[in-house]
Amino acid sequence: MLRAEKKLQMPPLLPERKEINFVFVDDPKLVGLSESKFVFTDISFGTTDRTRTIVVRDPDGKLRKATWDERARMNSLLEREEYEFVLDRACLQFEPDDPKFIHTCKLVFDSVNETSSFSVLRSTRHYGSLIFHLVEKENIDDLLIENMKTDRLEDATWLITLYHIIHPSTKSKSFAYSPGKELDLIKVLVM
C-alpha cells in the first residue's frame, strides 16, 4: 500500500530553477595554459547531488560554480561508480603529497569499500593503493570476503601477508603459512 501511495504521489510543481552563474575568481594569467576545462567535485560521503560542491576552471581563467548541466554530468559519473576517472583526474591535478590528493583518494577508496565495488579498480593502477589504504586502516574484512566469494584465495593470502607486514603484532602473524593452506590462514585471521 505504501509503495502504491509513493508511486501515485503527485510531483511538485516548482518554478523553473535559475541557471548557476557564479564566478569565484577571474584570473587572466591562466588564459591559454589549457584548452580544456577542469572540473573539481566534492566526493565526500553524505553529500547529495543537490548539495555537492562542483566548480569549473575554464580555459579563459575563470573559476566558477558548475552549471546545472555540468552538475548532472558529474553526479552521473559518481553514480556510475567512475572511481577510476576521479582517481585519474586527481593524479593529473595534484602532486601525490598534496593534502587534496590524499583526501580525494581516501574518500574514493572508502566509497569503493562501502559499496564493495573492488572489481571496478581491480585491473587499474589504483588497486594497490586501495589495498594499502584498507590495510593501513585495518579495514580489510569486506575485501577479504569479496576475494573468497570470487575464488581469489591467492589474493586473500597476499592481502593477509601485507596486513602482517604493516601490523606485525597481529595474532595470526605467528601462523606458519604454506601454499595450499590459504583457508587456514584466513580462518586464523578472522577468528
Image (cartoon, rainbow, N blue to C red):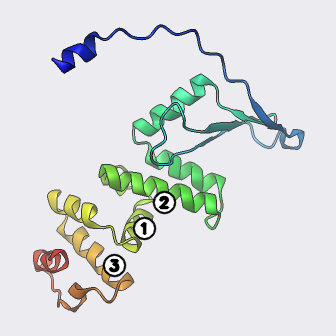
**Disc 1 to disc 3, C-alpha distance:** 11 Å
The residue tagged 1 is 133
Q: Which mark is residue 99?
A: none
- Amino acid, disc 1: His
Whether the residues at callouts 3 and 2 have beta carbons within 8 Å, the answer is no
Q: Residue at x 65, y 31 (%)?
A: 66
Using residue 100 as the reference point, say whether residue 11 is left or right of it: left
Please say whether residue 36 is visible from this viewpoint: no
Residue 135 rendering spot, x and y as whole percentages = 36, 72
The residue tagged 2 is 106
> Element under label 3?
helix
Looking at the image, is 108 positioned above or below residue 190? above
Camera-side residue of 126 and 115: 115
Whether the residues at callouts 2 and 1 have beta carbons within 8 Å, the answer is yes
- Amino acid, disc 3: Leu
- Amino acid, disc 2: Lys
Using residue 27 as the reference point, say whether residue 183 is left or right of it: left
Q: Which mark is residue 162?
A: 3
